[in-house]
Image (tube, rainbow, N blue to C red):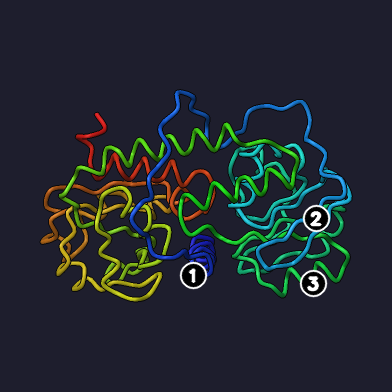
Amino acid sequence: MIRKTLILTLLLALAITGCAPASTPTEAPAPVATEISATEAPATEAPAATDGLTFTDDMGREITLAGTPERIVSLAPSTTEILFAVGAGDQVVGRDEFSDYPEEAKALPSIGGSFGEYNVEAIVALNPDLVIAAEINTPELVKQLEDLGVTVYYLSNPLTLEEMYGKLETVAELTGHDVSELVSSLQARVAAVDEKIAPISARPNVFYEIDASDPSKPYTYGPGTFGDLLITRAGGTNIGNVTTDAYPQLSLEQIVVENPSIIILGDSMWGVTPESVLERAGWESIEAVKSEQIFPIDDNLISRPGPRLVDGLEALAKILHPGVFE
């Protein structure tokens, strides 16, 4: 029952948080020597003052901060990861139920979020001077918090990796931090992948499995999602694009016809293994099954629009084209 609840919540979240279809990567900056983890920014002595600054959030609302926020509540896993990545982890006092990364975030008080149900009273009780909402959160929730006197900044999803860097810079500015070094490192890592993938003409057909509670009709990433974006940029062809839905269920017949040469298991977190896929009735004729090219992956690297999308890109690229990353 717990797994079913979490899967339904995940699919609800994914349906809300899709991004635009991937486009041809723009020319990336030249790589730099420094590499910084996507989960942490360079240490700073203290946040820079943001006293009296007015910002315009992604709903077009003007947000004025009386001072550098010291008590921040995050309403989504992606915003939690971004806050910690930009160096504002010590300023976060509350997080949604599914914020589980980095490890320190799990020790923070949860304010709910399962099936979109947030404990507004718990949020207010934390006395936040800033709440950061994401695209998974409804405008109604934002207004409800606003009506209670809570300052809320709404952060929409990036449509590309390049736009993601801008989201990092926005949150860094809101919280009084400098992420120029972190952004440069992420840009360099993406540029390194782009450089290796660019000469490759052979793009394997990829089936990315989100949930196979019904193995005859598993969920996958369709056009306009982060999964589609990253598979394409990593040098693959996403068979989920045979539909127009963002998160479709593909029938076994559709998967057999598309005949993916690689299967990625985003549902490995639920215990799905390559071995269990090999045993599925009707899957034996699929090329990826015959050649045992089935790989588990941490779906959080693919589905959360934050700095770890770069980790997801690297992981996918190494699976799809291992030879060029040796």
Q: Earlier in the sequence, mark 1 or mark 3?
A: 1
Q: Which residue is mark 3?
A: 144
In-image side of 45 versus 280 (left or right):
right
User: Quick one: 220 or 279, which is closer to the camera?
Assistant: 220
Q: Which residue is mark 2?
A: 54
Q: Are marks 3 and 2 in contact (CB under 8 Å)?
A: no
Q: How many numbered marks have been drawn onto this rendered protein structure?
A: 3
Which sits in the foreground, 191 or 90?
A: 191
What's the residue type where badge 1 is placed?
Ala
Label 2: few (<14), some (14–19) or many (≥20) C-alpha neighbours in 10 Å: few
Give the quadrant of the C terminus.
top left
Secondary structure beneath disc 1? Answer: helix
Rendering quarter of residue 140: bottom right
For disc 1, the marked residue is 15
Tell me the residue at 68%/60% (across/down): 133
Q: Amino acid at mark 3?
A: Gln
Q: Secondary structure at mark 2?
A: strand
Residue at the top extreme of this rendering: 33
The x and y percentages for residue 159 are 48, 59
* Residue at (74, 47) in percent of width and height: 174
Q: Quadrant of residue 131?
A: bottom right
* Whole-number angstrom distance, CA of label 1 to CA of label 2: 31 Å
